[in-house]
Image (cartoon, helix red, strand yellow):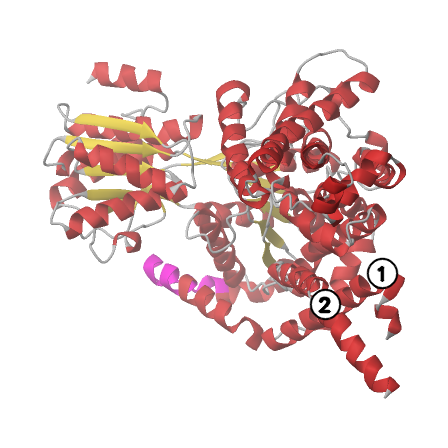
Amino acid sequence: MKKKYGFMMSAVLAAGTLLSACGTNDESSGGGSGSEEGDKNNFKVAMVTDTGGVDDKSFNQSAWEGLQMFGEENGLEEDKGFKYVQSTAASDYQPNLSGLVRDNYDLIFGIGFLMQQDIQAIAQQKPEAQLALVDSVAVNESGEPLENVASITFKEHQGSFLVGVIAGMQTKSNKVGFIGGVDSELIKKFESGFKAGVKSVNPDAEIFEQYAGDFNAAEKGQAIAGTLYDKGADIIYHAAGGTGNGVFTEAKNRAKNGEEVWVIGVDRDQHEEGMPENVTLTSMVKRVDTAVIEVSKQTMEDSFPGGKVTEFGLEEDGVGIAETQENVSEDALKKVEEYKEKIQNGDLEVPKTDEEYEAFVSSL
Amino acid sequence: MSILRGKWSAISVPLLSVALGLFVGGIIMLVSGYNPFVAYAALFNGIFSNTYVLGETIRQMTPLILSGLAVAFAFRTGLFNIGVEGQLLVGWLASVYVGLQFEGLSPFVHIPLAILAAGVAGAIWAFVPGLLKAKYHVHEVITTIMMNYVALHVVNAIIRTYLLAPGERTEEIHQSASLQSAFLESITDFSRLHYGIVFAIIGAIIMWFLLWKTSTGYELRAVGFNKYASEYAGINVRRNIILSMVVSGAFAGAAGAMEGLGTYGYMTVMPDFTGVGFDGIAVSLLGANSALGVVLAAALFGGLKIGALNMQSVAQVPTQLVEIVIAMIIFFVASSYLIHWISNRVNKRGKI
């Protein structure tokens, strides 16, 4: 196994950190697998990455970490029981997905809404295939859900609300910023949730929002962050993928010059991206790994959630604030817990769109 | 070794380069700890083992033929068209735009119209560097590269502003403009094989006919051999430079139409270049800038790219290794001078 030494190392390390963070691994998986070994070992699950690749420090990586954990827990062998296939170009999505269908995988994940078209096409061509689409809802021409696709979405607005609460509590200038990747329904959920969170705890705060029009333009992210910080914002929440890397660059440059500025990360715990200047206040994590594990489990237990939209929100631990909380004040954390409860109880409906946000603010 | 020189060298050097490229690729796999035999078997199976992958291979080679023809055509006039990528993008957008209009048109009118629009868009995009080269001697390599970026961002801006549909892309084109075919899909187990291959082959025939069977083609090639001599002989060099770029751009635009009308049926906001245009340079080089050579080289590269997916899935060899193999093949083709030199040395020694 020398060939994959480097990769295995990083995989083991990544899985290790996750496992240790999750606390004790339940022991039943070891004992339980004995009796059902035959059944479980026949299960084959795979994922197709988008062009970001499996080491993109974000979405795809998180999904693969989830799949690895699922494989380990159930005694599956890598490359036989669980594996990933990378796409180098958008035109690879379909042959990659289709190849796994022909290899009789029991469950195939398409990571990211970019694969929606291809998943929809294959689902209709191969009704016997079981597919899962992350971040979007697979439908046929008449807009009805496809019976053999499990659609996975996240309640990003809920997680964004919580980091908004932190921003609202900890801003000193009473001005915060939001930088979005591409102005779309998905990113609006981040924006509306965040703004609602800020306003809930700090009604006087001023919020600047701006879209970069791109998920992969770090230089734009940096320029916009510069503008927002110049306007007086001291905390910026970015929901902009690779563009967000520029936000970190700008914040770190300013931190070096003695300014006190913060960034709120997205998708994963982005604490590392803010080092060594330590500019990451917190991050809104989206647990793609949890979702991948959950849907894989259900499928293995013969309850594949095909045709359904499985939404991962606060209750399912699908979204939330990052585990690194050293920069978050005690008061803010208390407030976060308070609001978390309210959201879970249904006492508070977090807005997802501009209209819902307007209604939310006027009701405060 | 005489086979490496003379009239056979156009065939023997590329073949030897392919063999050497695969060989060096195999060594790299071995060094990285992969079994090259397993990997190449998976690669081979990934191209030929079933009708699906065969269909996908032909689908992949379709735009490669046209982008290869674009590079080769300009090269025959002594021009390096590095801007095929950008011309392809504007062609793609133009074909999709026409495909979105004119609902209810007959496919026999709509498809040629959309491809024509793509060709015209690519031609216009290539006309600018051609004009700059002819009038002001601005080097076409620089201008075409710059035009690639202009194309990428202009195309994205147009889609975002005027044609955006959910999912960061345009709407699907009307059925009457689509090259997709239920019949071809059914015989290839739902691959995305489409009728574009017919147009690509027609493109190759047009290139061959234009360059070798018309007096215009004779002039274009003469300029490529020696533009000063051509000028002395009374050929309008400027006109031929512009013409060559325009035709080259039209081929590149048509390559974009293959993606727009065939593979996808829409256009997405492009985060980055497709790479098809840049691969065209390699295809043209391996194909010795001839029409038939380009078709064969496109088949090889298309096959390698589709086979690589299976190689990754079955033998866990990263797809990047196929890119290394392709790079090696290009390296050996480009260093054909080296091969010639070695073969000359061996021959001389043999004679002495």
User: Which quadrant of the figure contains the N terminus of chain B?
Assistant: bottom right
Q: Is residue A19 left or right of residue B298?
A: left
The amino acid pointed to by label 2 is Tyr
Q: Is residue B217 left or right of residue B155?
A: right
Label 2: how many Cα within 10 Å (few below 14, some 14–19, many 20+): few
Write down the quadrant of residue A82 in the picture: bottom right
In the image, B170 versus B200, the foreground residue is B200
At which x and y percent is residue A109? 58, 46
Residue B60 pos. (x, y %): 73, 44
Q: CA distance from mark 2 to mark 1?
A: 14 Å
Identify the mark at residue B337; answer none if there is no mark.
Answer: 2
Q: Nearer the viewer, residue A192 or A34?
A: A192
**Residue B311 x, y percent position in the rendering:** 69, 60
Query: How many numbered marks appear?
Result: 2
Instruction: Give me the disc on residue A245.
Output: none
Q: Is residue B75 visible?
A: no
Residue bearing mark 1: B11
Dot in front, 2 or 1: 2
- Kind of residue indicated by mark 1: Ile
Which span of residues is magenta-colored?
A: A15-29
Q: Secondary structure at mark 1?
A: helix
> Do the dots labelled 2 and 1 sit on one chain?
yes
